[in-house]
Amino acid sequence: MGGALGESFRGARAPPRIAVTSAGIVPFYSRLPAVEVHLSDVDNREAFRRVSVLAGVCIARVAGKGPEGYRDALAHLKEAFTA
């Protein structure tokens, strides 16, 4: 993980316990709960976009809500930790 976000994780007192990402590779190599986020409505786009390769490793999928989808992803993660 690079940039300012990566630096903030590396400088944290404790490792992060959640991840919100649009990078498909992270859930496969992390043990953190993850939510699959798509800014566009992939279910109403090309057929190849409707197939999720992350479904088996993510706790939820949010699509078609634009940037607001990241807030929804955080709500799913909060629910997972408080359930």
Image: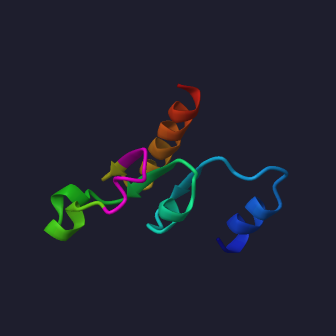
In magenta, the rendered stretch is 53-61
Locate residue 15, reporting x and y percent: 74, 53
Tell me if I can see residue 46 in this picture: no
Is 65 a magenta residue? no
Residue drawn at point x = 74 percent, y = 60 percent: 9
Locate residue 44, reporting x and y percent: 17, 58
From the image, give the main secondary structure of the stretch colored magenta.
loop
Is residue 33 shown left or right of residue 46?
A: right
18, 69: nearer the viewer = 18
73, 51: nearer the viewer = 51
Locate residue 28, reporting x and y percent: 48, 63
Placement of 72 over or under 63, stated as above or below: above
Locate residue 17, reporting x and y percent: 66, 47
Residue drawn at point x = 44 percent, y = 67 percent: 24
Is 54 a magenta residue? yes
Residue drawn at point x = 39 percent, y = 45 percent: 60
